[in-house]
Amino acid sequence: MALAAVTPARAQELGGAGTILGTIKDPTGGVLRAATVTLSNPVSGLRRETTTDEMGRFTFRNLPPNPYHVTVAVQGFQTLARDVDVRSAVPITLELTLNLAATTQSVEVIGTVDLLEANPSAHTDVDQSLVEKLPLEAVGGLNQAITLAAPGVVADSNGFFHPQGDHAEVSYSVDNQPVSDQQSKAFSTQLPPSAIQSLEIITGATPAEFGDKTSLVVNAITKSGLNQKKPTGNITFTYGTFGTVNQETSLAYGNAKAGNFVDFNFDRSGRFLDAPEFTVLHDRGTSFNLFDRFDYALSPKDTFHVNLFLARNKFQQPNTFDQQALGQDQHQLVHSLNIAPGLVHVFNPHTILTINPYYRLDIVKYFPSANPFSDETTTINQQRRLNNVGVKADVAYVNGIHNAKFGVQLSHTFLTENFQFGITDPNFNDPASPDFLPGLLQFDLTRGGHLFNFHGHTDIKQEAAYAQDNITLHNLTLNLGLRFDNYDGISHDHSFQPRLGASYLVKRTNTVLRASYTHNFETPYNENLILSSATGAGGLADGVLGSAISQPLKPGRRNQFDVGFQQGFGKLVVFDIDYFNKRTTN
């Protein structure tokens, strides 16, 4: 069996996913039709099977970066197996030759199915086959899958989680589109689990291509309709306690040139958010989302795709018994729109260019009760709008021991915030109290005051450049990277960030040892950023709300060290242990 150079016969689809394609031949050089080719990864659970066409060719697309085991079986020939490592979007082409079967059937094996992965980054791989088995809801199921699958991730209320001891320092990469804003259902919306093909959840040694929030990086690849010659889909309907109703419909169809995947979800529940009481009060909510991915091969060297995502969450804020008795009726509305086109161009067998522009919109509205005095302590009204437009472009180069990537990322975020509140409890800021705050008296509705009214708008410009190389030297693997970030928002800062990692495979004991050092530039959260950073006359630092900050929120810097190892036991069990030490300066 031989591994041939990559040929630009068909450009790779987008999203950072990989492609394995090849040709099956007999000993005379003739092509073998209808040969069964199986691709598998025992750790993530991914398993796919296809047959060769009339030219003896096969293709596996949309593969997450992982090692894979390829097996070829044809009646009358020896079964052949090969291990292939996918680490970039540069396609891998195989030319495989099968030997005739002898009287005693034998199997030619080059490589073995291995649970170990010689990668300096601690991470967890999750395939759709595992996602489909987990008890996930449509509204916040992506965060639930991450919490259940990844170590060091602690669940919080309403689908929120804390990774590696941090508060929401998470970046998502969805088909190569960076998203670093909070994705819990109280802040925004997120992709449904039914649209996910695979997840790579990185908890250590973050590669240089990822920035902003890096305590946890979720590299998500969505499902595609390419090569779905027979339309494939499903319709599910579920009903549960609290009047919960969920309906999900998906359909994938296409061929080698074009494909489309569409997924629609609707969810209604009487317990939409986590309730503060065992008895659920005032907690109804509905959600719907629509995801569509379209892929099209413009030419043998160019592939285009576009992701479209629409979503809406409308829900009540759950009450305590006291709030319910007052008639409190606070509720929230979230609208989201995401459009992410992209293009891949193959220059030669070793080099490809990927360009991913994107536009994302989040509109969040928080409504008080119709009667402000039904709201306990204070009545609050808020409207937030986030527009994020940007582009990520990189060149991937694979040759010999090198697997390199060089890229830039530009983004522009427009933020608008409106916030109103008033005091509705006469005991909250009683003038007779020693803790009385004079600045709040004008907003005390129980004493003839008026609503505090805040309006703010800003835009944030971010630029980044990065270079990284994954170098394989027999059993030693090195990840060398450098990233530069410039943050120009309410505050201003920039940083160079080295990202270094190494791993070594000890074959004799079936062990992988790894260590890494990363320097990270942590940008401020966009949610409520303007209100939190408001200063000066007419702002919040004049003491109208009591103690307040005197300067805007600034980016932080983190130094993180990771050491760990993997130990395999047979073909079914592997232990993966990681220790991290990080120090953040804000």
Image: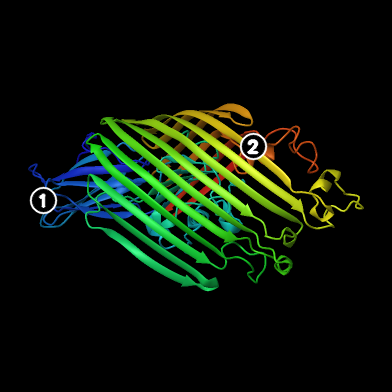
- Residue 154 in percent (x, y) is at 59, 54
Residue 571 visible in the current orientation: no
- 152 or 190, nearer to the observer: 190
Residue 90, placed above or below residue 189: above
Quadrant in which the C terminus is drawn: top right
Measured in 3D between alpha carbons, the distance from the residue under mark 2 to the one under mark 1, in whole angstroms, is: 61 Å
Q: Nearer the viewer, residue 175 or 406?
A: 175
Q: Quadrant of the N terminus?
A: top left
Question: In the rendering, at what x and y percent does residue 140 appear?
Answer: 51, 57
Task: Name the image quarter holding residue 155.
Answer: bottom right
Q: Residue at x 48, y 35 (%)?
A: 501
**Residue 48 drawn at (x, y percent):** 28, 54
Between label 2 and label 1, give the one nearer the viewer. Answer: 2
Looking at the rendered structure, the kind of residue marked 1 is: Leu
* Left or right for 582, reference 310: right
Tell me which residue sits at (26%, 37%) in the image.
Answer: 11
* Residue 407 marker: none
The residue sitting at 65% across, 59% down in the picture is 330
Could you say which quadrant of the image residue 503 lies in?
top left
Q: Which residue is mark 1?
A: 100
Label number found at residue 584:
2
Circle 1 SS class? loop
User: Eyeballing the image, is 180 above or below 496?
Assistant: below
In the shown orientation, is residue 69 left or right of residue 567? Answer: left
Element assignment for label 2: strand
Do the residues under discs 2 and 1 have CB atoms within 8 angstroms?
no
Tell me where residue 219 appears, x and y as whole percent. 44, 44
Question: Amino acid type of disc 2?
Answer: Thr
Q: Residue 423: in sight, yes or no?
A: yes
